Image: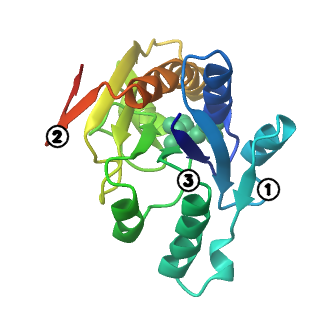
Amino acid sequence: MKKFAVFASGNGSNLQAIIEAVKAGDIKAELALVFSDNYKAYALKRAEEIGIPTLSLRPKDYTNKQSFERDLVIYLKERDIDFVVLAGYMRLLTPYFIKQYPQKILNIHPSLLPSFKGRNGIKDAFTYGCKVAGVTVHFVNEKMDNGPIIMQDSLKIYEKDTLESLTEKIHQLEHKVYPKAIALYVEDRLNVRGRKVKIK
Ligand code: GRF
C-alpha cells in the first residue's frame, strides 16, 4: 500500500475529509504522516487525536528554505512516504523539493484555476463579482497554483451569498472533491500528458 503525507499549516478541514476517506476505505493508501510548518496548526491536533504520526518543523529555525526542505525530505524518506498531499499548506515548495517527488505532489486550491491564484482565492472571486466559483485539484509544479489540473468542480454564487456563506460552500465542495481526486491518484488512474490529465 502506498504511504502518503499531508502537509497543512492551519485548520485542517481538508485533512479531516481525507482522514474520513481513508477510514472508509475510499482512499486505499496509508496516511503515514501529517506535517506542519506551524506548531500551533489545528491540523496536527486532528492527526494526534487518532494516532497519526505528526511532524512540525519551524522554517525560522533554519538558515534558509533549502536546509528546511532538506531536513523535511530526510524525514519523509525515512518514513517511506510515496506521495504528498498539500491541504492548506501555506508555503511554496522549492524546485529541490518538487524534484524529490516528481508528479507526486497534489494540491487543492479554492478557485477555478487559472483564475484567482494565491492566498485569497475565494474572496477574490467573490469581490470580482463572479457568478460561478469552484475548486481545483492539481499536481504541483514549480509555479504557484499552476500544475496540471486533475479535477475541478463549481458552484453558483447567488445574490444572497456573503463571503462567509460562499467560503462555507467552497469548503464543503473541497471536502467532496479532494478525497475523490486522491483516490484516483492512488489507484494509478491519472494519465498525465503535458498539461492534460486523463482519467483512465
Ligand atoms: C483550503 O481552502 C484549501 O483549498 C487552501 O487552503 C484551505 C485550507 O483549509 N489551499 P483547511 O486547513 O483544509 O481547513
Horizontally, residue 6 falls left or right of residue 11, namely: left
Quarter containing the C terminus: top left
Q: Nearer the viewer, mark 2 or mark 1?
A: 2
Asked if 14 appears above or below 6 in the picture, the reply is: above
Give the alpha-carbon distance from disc 1 to disc 3, as whole Å. 25 Å
Give the alpha-carbon distance from disc 2 to disc 1, as whole Å. 36 Å
Asked if 146 appears above or below 136 in the picture, the reply is: below
Q: Residue at x 41, y 14 (%)?
A: 155
Name the residue type under label 1: Lys
Q: Earlier in the sequence, mark 2 or mark 3?
A: 3
Q: Residue at x 64, y 35 (%)?
A: 15
Residue bearing the label numbered 1 = 40
Q: Are marks 1 and 3 in contact (CB under 8 Å)?
A: no
Name the residue type under label 3: Asp
Q: Which mark is residue 80?
A: 3
* Quarter of the view holding residue 90: bottom right
Badge 1 crowding class, 10 Å Cα cut-off, few under 14, some 14 to 19, many 20 or more, is few
Q: Earlier in the sequence, mark 2 or mark 1?
A: 1
Residue bearing the label numbered 2 = 195
